[in-house]
Image (cartoon, rainbow, N blue to C red):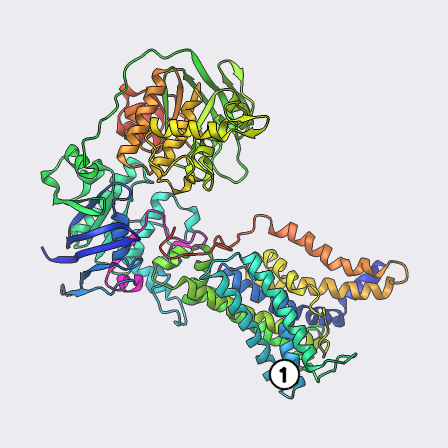
Amino acid sequence: MTLALSIEGVTKRFGTLVANDRIDLALHRGEILALLGENGAGKTTLMNVLFGHYVADEGSIRVAGPDGALASLPPGSPHAALGAGIGMVHQHFALAESLTVLQNVVLGTRPLSAPHLGLRAARAKLERLMGESGLHVRLNARIANLSVGEKQRVEILKVLYRDARILILDEPTAVLTPQEADGLFATLRRLAASGLAVIFISHKLGEVLAVADRVAVLRGGRKVSDQPIAGVDRRMLATLMVGREIGVSRRTLREPGPPLLVLDQVSMRLPSGRAGLDGVSLTVRGGEIVGIAGVSGNGQAALAALIAGMAEASAGSVTLAGKPLRASPRAAIEAGIARIPEDRHAEGIVGPLSVAENLALESLDSPEVQRLGFLRFDRLRERASQAIAAYDIRCPGPEAPIRLLSGGNIQKVILARVLERDPRLILANQPTRGLDVGAAAEVHRRLLEARMNNVGIVLISEDLDELLALCDRIAVMVKGRLTAPEPVETLTLERLGLLMAGHREEEAA
Amino acid sequence: MLEGLFDILLSSSFWAAAIRIATPLMFGVLGALICERAGVLNLGIEGIFTAGAMAGWLAVYLGADLWTGLLAAAATGAAFGLIHALLTVPLGLSQHVTGIGVTLLATSLAYFTYRVYLPNVATPPRITPFQPVAIPGLSDLPFLGPALFQQTPLTYLALALFALAALVLYRTPLGLAIRAVGENPAAVGAQGLSVHGLRIGAVVVGSAVMALGGAFLTMAAFNAFFFEMTNGRGWICIALTVFASWRPGKALLGALLFGAFDAFQLRLQHRLGGVVPGQVFLMLPYLLSIAALIAVSRGADYPKALMVPYFKGQR
């Protein structure tokens, strides 16, 4: 096999943090290399060094030219990286929404002083590339009108259009249904067979095993393993990634309690054209976890806002333990609903405030927190110290501004705030998104514990493995409609995928 | 009464006046559009108008010819644009606050310069302005000829700049890059282009074009520099940009519409001045503009990255 790329001893430091520590990595033509690691392991930093967004403190990168000869890549220049045939598909798409597919692809490919866009030649070349790769999109469509899967195809076409020899994909399946992901894997294999070298960044073990030829594992900025996929299994990769064995919490069987949250034919319209709710019915009982699966943007946000009292239904009824629920966040909190918000930074915390203050945010009325309208700082500190110990929150102390904490530790603060209030119902929206395996396991353990204490839990998640592991029943959200929840014992990943893609009951069965 | 109104609308002298009044707005709205398409709101426009008016007039007053004066105005606008761009693009400061700061700075500097040259003058000295140029052939057309083709060269320049801007924005790689940088700078950065370079360039060029609008005031309309002469025209251009949904064709139309409202109120004042207080008519173009804004620009397709600073390696 001929070498396409050679990363040699790359070290990148941010202050005292060593994000990449003497990393060597080789990539061959026609090979799919998976780069596996937790958040913060250094995967994205390494790719940013490769793509010229960062300059490495030590080490060098050599890239093979069209003739196969290795030449060193000038550091710190995305322009040079593109010129050397490296193309990157970012996790957050780098597309201009109001421009067409064709315009997005030709952007930056011609000198700015060129008198015209050369669209005719571009279209011909793209049509040939679409035929060869099987990536079909309508070239005149505006990006805003495309599905997420189609946008990803445009991103890959952008790379192919520049005659890239190396394709880097950063967490490409995060936004896809399982079926779309399978389609992507097939495409990647076809591209690799035609000689393209592919780097596939992921923290999901299953897809690494499914698509890669070779896997390199990063942990704490170091490469801890690099071997052919044939010799590894799931358990081995997980241990390599985390550095220790991860205890998996298991759901124990129990009889759920009486109905707690009941949604009856609830509809909700949103002005902005985003998906609302359309005749949604759902019953959540105490002591059970009901999962809501679905591709993001199908109405999960509306459902979460409804349950948290932040939005009002236009039709239908919402009751908690038999009492109608008013559309007010305060009423929801008083009724015993606690929420783990989807965007923990935007909706879960107030960054500049301390850990102690953030812990008290949802119980400002309680005499525990205030007396005669004055905050009881000694009590706040005390409560915070207890929570820090009980939930293993890694932080400088109760007075530290919460924005300094890592995502996993912020989530533990939110979890502590939610559970300390002894809620009757927990609304957990993407509770482990972006968390490392250890922190995610802790969140799972706490949710299962709450379930045993008769708390009803609505778990909205895009991680199907998570749903299948934690939930008693799972419903699927498609275009504002909710399928009837099915017991997890009878559900499979394939069936969930079909339901998520909007297939009707009979087809999916 | 109603017949009188129609007479106004059908006279070519009315339309000639409308186009004349619209000319500074054409420069202004085009300049604002270029900045905003690249994602930078330039509220320095009001001050850049004043500075352009001052610089163009002063150059001619000191002995330069008219076209050199115009160049001086454009260079002054570009300089203030560069200040705005350097503060808002690489440093990412608030575009609102910086823009208002630039307006205050440019206005005050213009007044200061005026006073330095003319410390004790009661009546502002006049210069010989641009004269109307009849386009051979076209100016003889009925109605259209006197309305459109007997204007000063600055009006023709404004129209030519609109055509050029539309061509560049929609037909060239540079224009595509400018539009994309106002939509999603990360997309432009990922394609190996310089986001900051494109934005700074657009703001500098846009500001130079704005300054030409100011120069029209002193070099083709009032022939002298007065305090307060910009009189909110810059702000009107910011509103017109929204009215135009950031499209050059609609921007030109918007400027003409406002010019027509203004010319119309002047004539109404003339006819009905005895009955209705003049201030009512002065208000008219602004009221109509607000009405037009409400009617047209709700849900306008604005540049998604307008006022969003971009820092490399951050998303």
The residue closer to the viewer here, A407 or B290, is: A407
The verdict on residue A88 being magenta is yes
Q: Residue B65, how many percent across, how many down?
A: 62, 87
Q: In this view, does A229 lie above or below B139?
A: above
Q: Quadrant of residue B222?
A: bottom right
Read off the chain for label 1: B
Quick one: SS at disc 1? helix
The verdict on residue A221 being magenta is no
Please identify the residue farthest to the front as the structure is shown.
Answer: A378
**Image quadrant containing the N terminus of chain A:** bottom left
Residues packed near mark 1 inside 10 Å, few (<14), some (14 to 19) or many (20 plus): some
Q: Residue B174, how many percent across, how many down?
A: 42, 67
Please identify the residue farthest to the right as the structure is shown.
Answer: B274
**Image quadrant containing the C terminus of chain A:** top left
Q: Residue B17, how many percent across, how many down?
A: 73, 71
Please give the name of the residue rendered at 49% of the width and 33% of the height, measured from the top-left corner: A276
Q: Residue B123, how many percent across, how many down?
A: 78, 79
The residue closer to the viewer here, A359 or B245, is: A359
The boundaries of the magenta stretch are: A77-101
Question: What residue does disc 1 label?
Answer: B59
Please give the name of the residue rendered at 24% of the width and 65% of the height, measured from the top-left corner: A74
Q: In this view, does A494 lie above or below A59?
A: above
Q: Is residue A321 left or right of residue A475?
A: right
Please give the name of the residue rendered at 52% of the width and 68% of the height, measured from the top-left corner: B83
Q: Is residue A41 above or below residue B69?
A: above
